Image: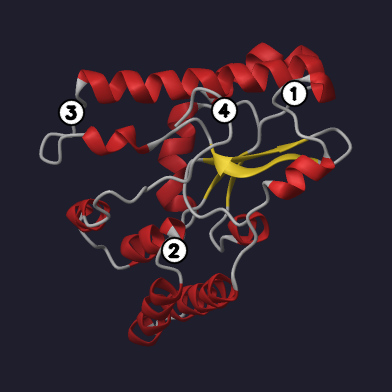
Amino acid sequence: MWQRLYNELAEHDFVVITIAMDSRGADAAREWIEAAEPAHPSLIDRDHVVSDLYNMVNVPMAVWIDEDGRIVRPAEYAGTNDAFRGQDRETGAWSDEAFQEMRRARLIYMDAIRDWARNGAASEFAWDQSEARDHLRLPSEETTLANAHFRIGQHLRQHGRVEEGDRFLEEAKRLAPDNWNIWRQAWNLQDAPVSTFWERVDALGDRRYSLPIDMPGIG
């Protein structure tokens, strides 16, 4: 998706920077990056610096930044929604309905990026400073504290203090129950089975997994 957009919009000085939020580092993320063969910058953020700065609570999320360094659209889910919950837990197969809904949302989001790259501030999807500020989701005090606990937990684990590190990771999860980046990466570090993720998703019931996007056509 991102490589295709990068190639297509290069003549408009459009640049994609993808960032893997993988706490296990380069060895864990490399195979996925190499398989994608990106020509655009593709980085690995082991310490989740970017997610802290932009308050990214899950993947995939995106931030639109113009040529003057101004945030045009703050962190938002990048063309995805809760339709993925229709995936079969055993086989990983998608129902046709769920697949088509996810595909529709992604195409809408990609078309919005195309419009912005070609039309700049005149794009209907580009927000001015006031609108961007109104859509900005600031981290709560608990989230900020959770990020600190998560960093400490990672640091301790990287230096062989696994049990102590896990106590900080558990506290980070408690402080930020809706920050899926923290939960997923803690599970990865602790080698939790994939079923752990699905159990927590299913426990949401009628509550949303993904945050809504203020873009026509994406629920």
The answer to which of marks 4 and 2 sits earlier in the sequence is 4
The disc placed on residue 120 is: none
Q: Secondary structure at mark 2?
A: helix
Q: Amino acid at mark 3?
A: Ala
Q: Residue at x 62, y 62 (%)?
A: 52
Compute the Cα span from label 4 to label 2: 26 Å
The answer to which of marks 1 and 4 sits earlier in the sequence is 1
Q: Splitting the image into 4 quarters, where does residue 66 fall? A: top right
Q: Secondary structure at mark 1?
A: loop
In the image: residue 145, left or right of residue 7: left
Residue indicated by mark 3:
93
In the image: residue 67, left or right of residue 140: right
Tag 1 near tag 3, CB within 8 Å: no
Front of the two marks 1 and 4: 1
The foreground one among 173 and 205 is 205
The answer to which of marks 4 and 3 sits earlier in the sequence is 4
The answer to which of marks 2 and 3 sits earlier in the sequence is 3
The foreground one among 12 and 216 is 216
Q: Position of residue 19 (x, y in %)?
A: 57, 44
Image position of 26 with respect to 164: above or below: above
Q: Splitting the image into 4 quarters, where does residue 113 fall? A: top right
The disc placed on residue 182 is: 2
